[in-house]
Amino acid sequence: MLGPSNRLTLIEAMRPPAGFHLESAVAVTFTLNLQSLLAVPAAFTLAGQDDLGEDGGGARPVELVHALRANADKLTVFSEAGHISLPPPSRAFGFLERAVVAVKAPRGGIVHPKVWVLRYQEITAAEAENAPERRLRLLVSSRNLTFDTSWDTVLRLDETPRSGGAMLKAVGDLFAGLLDTTITNPSQEHRARVGSLVEALETARFALPDAVDELKVHVFGLSDNRDDPFPEEPERAMIISPFLADGFFNLAESASNGVYRGPVDTLVSRQGALDDTCHQILAGIGDKRIFDDGSAHEASDPDDAGDSPTPRRSRFLSRDDPGRPLRGLHAKVFAFEKGNRARLFVGSANATRAAFRNNLEILIELEGSTGQLGIDRLLEGDDDQPGLSTLLHPYHRSPEKPSDDGDTTDLDQIRRKVAHLKIEGTVEKGGAGGHDWTVTYRSEAPLPEREDIRINCWPVTIPGHKRSVKAGKPLEERFATSLERISGFLAFELLHTGGGQQTGFVVPVTLAGVPEHRDRRLLKALIGDAKRFLRYLLALLYEDSPAAGLEGTVRRLTDSDDGSGHSAIGVAVLEQLLRTMRSDPSKLAGLHPLITDLGEDDALPPGFAELWDGVYAVARGDSPPRRSEAP
C-alpha cells in the first residue's frame, strides 16, 4: 500500500473519470508554486495526455491555454500567506489570480494541510432529460503544490453510491473554517464554491481503500480542542517524519509534556533531523533509520519553523523560503499495532509539537489487520510489492560540524508580516512610457521596518520594474503596464544587508477596475498571432506520435522562421484539414471543443471559424453551411 514502487502523481490523481469533466474544486496547500498550479487545469481538460511535466509536459500550447481558460474559474486554492514561491514572469498567471486565496493559521502556527476536494460532472448531451451525475473525490497528501522531487504519500478516496463507506464531514469543516482565516475577504464565488462542496460532504460516502476496515478524519488547529488521536498503549509503534522536535515525544523527563505518550519502536527521518533530536529521547528508541533514495537532499525546515533547532541551510536563502526545493523524505506516517489490529495515520502533520498545538493540520486514520496495514508489511512488503526498508539505512549520528550560516529568523518574521498585510490593487486607464494602463497597489497597514532589511516589490509579469519600497509606511506603488500584463500577483524580495540572506515570495492581490475584455485579450496574446495559431493547428493535425514527443514538434514549428508567409501556412492547414476530414474525422471531433471556445473568445484568425464550421459539418456527415452565390 505504501510501497516505493506504488507511485501515483498528484496530476494523475486529479484526472476525471471516463465520461466526466471537472465541475468545481477546492484545495489547501502550505507551499504553492504557480507553475505547478498551471498544470492543474491541464489535468482536468487533457485527460488523455500521459506526460504533463513542469511546463505542461505533453500538453500542446494552445490546448494548455484553453485548459486554463476553461478551468481556472472553477478552482479555490487556499495557501499559507508568504509561501507562494517566486515564479518566472508569465502572462498565463493572469488566469490563476482569482483562484488563489492567502490564509493564516488561527492559532499562530501555519496552515499546513495538503487536501483537494474535486467534484466531477458527467458529460451529457444538451437534450438529456436526467440531470448529469456528479461524483466527489478527496485527495489527502503530504505533498505541497510544487515540483519538489520529495517522497510523499497521497490518499485518494472516491464517492460511492453504495451504503456504508466513510463519511468525510470533517474535511468540509476544514474548508468552511478556512474561509475565516483569509487575509482578504473571499469573493462571493469562492464562498459559494466552498459552501456547495462542504454541503455535499455532509452526506456523501466514500469507498474505503483496499485492506481498510474503518476510516476517520482528524483536523487540528481550527479550535482550541487538543484531543490527540494516537492510541496511548500500542504494542508497537513506528513514526516516519522528515521533521522532528523534542516537544513531540514523551520519552524523557525533559519532554514530559510531549504530544505522544506511547513507545516508539521504529523512527524514520532525515539525518539532520535525527542529529538535532535530544540524545535522551533517541536513547529510548531502539530502531532509528534514515531515508535515502540516493538523491542529494537540501535540508530545510519550512514545515515547522520555530519548533526545532536552526537547521543547516544555504546562507543565501531564508530558512523557509518557498522556492527552496524539498528532496528525499517528506512523507508523514504514524503506524501502531495492538493485537491483530493496525492503525495508520497519514496526512500533513510532522512529529513536532507545533503540528499538534499551533498549526492547522489533517491526518487520516486507516484501520485494518496487521497482516495488511501492519508495520512489518509497510517495511518489508510482500511477494508483489517491495517495502520501504529498501530505502532505509541505520542511523549514525554525524560528527559535530560548525555552521557558517547566518540567522534568518528575523528575515522570515518580516516575510510573515508582509504576507499578512491586506493589499489591494486599483487598475486605471492611462499610463506612462507608452503603456495604456496603470495598477496601484496599496495597503492600509504599514510595511514592517528593519534597518538591516531592504524590501523590493514588483508585479510578477514585469520583473524589470522591481523597485525598493519604504518600510514603516503603508504600501503605495504605481506600475505602468499593458492590459495583458496587469497582475493580481505582487512579488516581494527581502534582502538582509548584513548577512546577504534573501527570500522571495508572492502575495495575491484583489484587483478593482479590471476591464471585462481583459481575459479575451490575454487569451489572444498567449495564443499568438494568426501565423502562430495556424502553425499550432498544423502540428495538431499532423500528429502521429505520442504526446511526449509532440511538444518538441510544436516548439520547433513555433520557433522556426523560414520566411514563409501567412498565406503559405494557411494553404497547408486547409490541405491538411481536408485530408483529415476524409481520413480521420474523429480527430476533428476531438479538436472541435477547442476551436469552438476559441471562436467564442474571438481568438481565431479572421475567417477561420467559418472555414472550420464547413469542414467539420462535412466530417460529421451534415450538410455544410450555405454560402452566398457570387453575382
Image: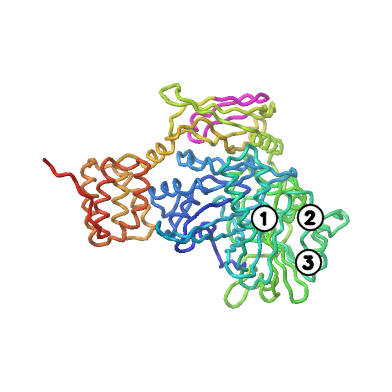
Quarter of the image containing the N terminus?
Answer: bottom right
Q: Residue at x 54, y 28 (%)?
A: 426
Q: Nearer the viewer, residue 294 or 228?
A: 228
The answer to whether marks 3 and 2 mark residues whose Cβ atoms lie closer than 8 Å is no
Left of 537 or right of it: where is 449? Answer: right
Q: Amino acid at mark 1?
A: Ser
Left of 343 or right of it: where is 440? Answer: left
Give the residue number, with chain letter if any, for mark 2: 248
456 within the magenta span:
yes
Q: Amino acid at mark 3?
A: Gly
| Element under disc 1 | loop
Q: Nearer the viewer, residue 333 or 578?
A: 578
Q: Nearer the viewer, mark 1 or mark 3?
A: 1
Q: Residue at x 49, y 55 (%)?
A: 22
Q: Nearer the viewer, mark 2 or mark 1?
A: 1
Give the residue number, with chain letter if any, for mark 3: 286
Outermost residue toward the right in this view? 253
Separation (CA) of disc 3 from disc 2: 18 Å
Q: Nearer the viewer, residue 571 or 332?
A: 571
Q: Quadrant of residue 334?
A: bottom right
Give the residue number, with chain letter if any, for mark 1: 348
- Packing grade of label 1 (10 A; few <14, some 14-19, many >=20) is many
Q: Which residues are magenta?
A: 455-477
